[in-house]
Amino acid sequence: MSEFDGAPSIKVTSVSKVYPGGKKALTDVSFEVESGSFVVLLGPSGSGKSTLIRCIAGLERVSEGKIQFDSKTVSSKDLHIKSEERELSMVFQDYALWPHMTALDNVAFALRRRSLPKSQRKTLATSMLDRMGLMHLADRYPQELSGGEQQRVALARALVARPGLMLFDEPLSNLDADLRERLRVEISTLTREVGATALYITHDQSEAFALADYVGVLDRGRLVQLDRPEELYAKPKTPFVARFTGLAGDLPAVVDSVDLSRHVVSTLDGCAWLSASSNVTLQKGEKVRMLIRAAAVKMAALAVSGVNPQRGTLSGTVSDVAFRGIGYEHVVEVSDGYRLSGIFSDLRHSRGTGVLLSFDPEGCILFPEKSEGASSVTLDNKSLKTDETRLEVSPSLP
Ligand code: ADP
C-alpha cells in the first residue's frame, strides 16, 4: 500500500535552491496546498517556477528548507525521497512520451508498478484512452501523433494511475490557442474528477485564473502572493503582481488628501472617484502610481458623452482598435506617453477619435511611487498638472 493514499496536502517551508555554480533560483519560499485543491504558480520566465515544481517532484534537491506531503518530509537539506517514491504524476511541456511505445502502451506503462496482470493494465489504459476520446489513436506511435494528441496521451498516462498528486509543467505552452483552451478544460475537469491535489505552473495569467483554486505569483525566486484568483486580482500585494495579472496601464499621481472615507489624488487631466488597494497606506503629498485594470475603464465618444471632463474622467484619443468578436479593444492615449490598452467597448471607436474614460474605483489600485516595480515609465520629464486635475480615491479596505 502506498504511503500517500489519497490526495496529499503539500507544505513547503522556507525552501531555497542554489544551483551548482551559484545561481539562486528560489529564496525562502513557503506555502501550503490543501488536499484536493488546484494551485497554479504563475510567473515570468526565469522566476523559478520549474525549479520549484521540480523540487516538489523530487527531480531537484532543495538547498534549504523542507517539503512535506501530508506530515511526511520528502525533501530537506539532508533528506531526499526519490521522485518514483513520491506517488505523483507529472505532465511536461514536451509531452515526454516513450517513442518506441504505442499510445496505449505509453498509458499502460504508467501502471507498471501496480501488481496487476498485464491484460488488466491494458484494459485500464484502454478505458482511459476511450474516456479521453483517443481510442482511434491507441496503436499509433508518438511520432505519428500531432502535438495536441501527444499531450492528451501524456495526460491520459498521468491520470490512469489515479495519482494523489498531479504536477503540470507548462503543459499547454506548445499548443495552438484553440487546442490549448480545450485541453485546459480537460485538465481541469479530469484532475478534479480523480480528486487529486494539483500543482500547475504557467507564465500565462488567463490560464492561471481559469484553472486555479489558488494562484501563487513568483517574482525572481520569491513567492510574493498566494491567494484566490479574485483576491489576487482585486488586492494585489505588489505592483509586480498587479502588472502580471493584467493592467490597462498606469498613471502617475499625487495624493492630495487622505481622510476616513477616501483618498484624493491628482493625475494627468481629470477627476475620478477611485479605490486604493487595501494594503497601502498613503500620505498627503505622496507620489503614487495608479495601476488600472482594463475591466475598470469605460469609454464614451467625447462628442456624445455629456460628461464633464473635469469630474471623474480622463480625456484621450484612440490610437488603436482591434476587433475581438463580441466587441472592440482600444488603446487610448491619455496624455503624451501615457496610454491605456485593452479598453473594451461594444462600439468601434476609430483611430484618432476623442474619447472620455471613466473608472470603476475597485479596479484602480494605488501604490507608492517608490514601491518596487511601481514605475514603468520615467516621470522626470512629465510634470503633473496638480491644480487642474483631481482624482478622488476611496480609502484602503480593512
Ligand atoms: P522558470 O521556470 O520560471 O522559467 P526556472 O526555475 O527554470 O524558471 O529558472 C530559475 C532560474 O534558475 C533562472 O535564472 C535559470 O536560468 C536558473 N536555472 C534553472 N535551471 C538551472 C540549472 N540546472 N543550473 C543553473 N541555473 C539554473
Image (cartoon, helix red, strand yellow):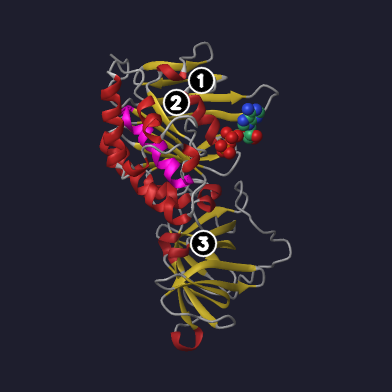
Q: In the image, which disc is placed on residue 65?
A: 1
- Secondary structure of the residue carrying tag 3 is strand
Badge 1 vs badge 2, beta-carbon distance below 8 Å: yes
Q: In the rendered structure, does residue 155 fall within the stretch colored magenta? A: yes
Which residue is at 51% across, 62% downward?
257
Q: Position of residue 382 (x, y in %)?
A: 70, 67
Which residue is painted at 54% across and 22% down in the image?
60
Q: Is residue 178 above or below residue 111?
A: below
Q: In this view of the protein, which residue sits in the foreground, 158 or 320?
A: 158
In the image, taking residue 117 as reference, residue 59 lies left or right, namely: right
For marks 1 and 2, the one nearer the N-term is 2
Q: Is mark 1 within 8 Å of ligand 1?
A: no
Q: Is residue 98 magenta?
A: no
Q: Residues within 10 Å of mark 2 (few under 14, many from 20)?
A: many
Q: CA distance from mark 1 to mark 2?
A: 8 Å
x, y percentage for residue 384?
65, 68
The N terminus: image quadrant: top left
Disc ID at residue 257:
3
Q: Is residue 398 visible?
A: no
| Residue shown at 40% from the left, 30% from the top | 106
Q: Residue at x 34, y 23 (%)?
A: 111
Q: On the image, which quarter does residue 134 sit in? A: top left
The percent position of residue 259, horizontal first and vertical second, equals: 45, 59
List the single residue furthest toward the bottom.
Answer: 303
Q: Which residues are magenta?
A: 146-164
For disc 2, the marked residue is 12
Q: Amino acid at mark 2?
A: Val
Mark 3 or mark 1, which is nearer the start of the sequence? 1
Within 8 Å of ligand 1, the CB of disc 2? no
| Front position among marks 2 and 3 | 2
Q: Amino acid at mark 3?
A: Ser
**CA distance for labels 2 and 3:** 42 Å
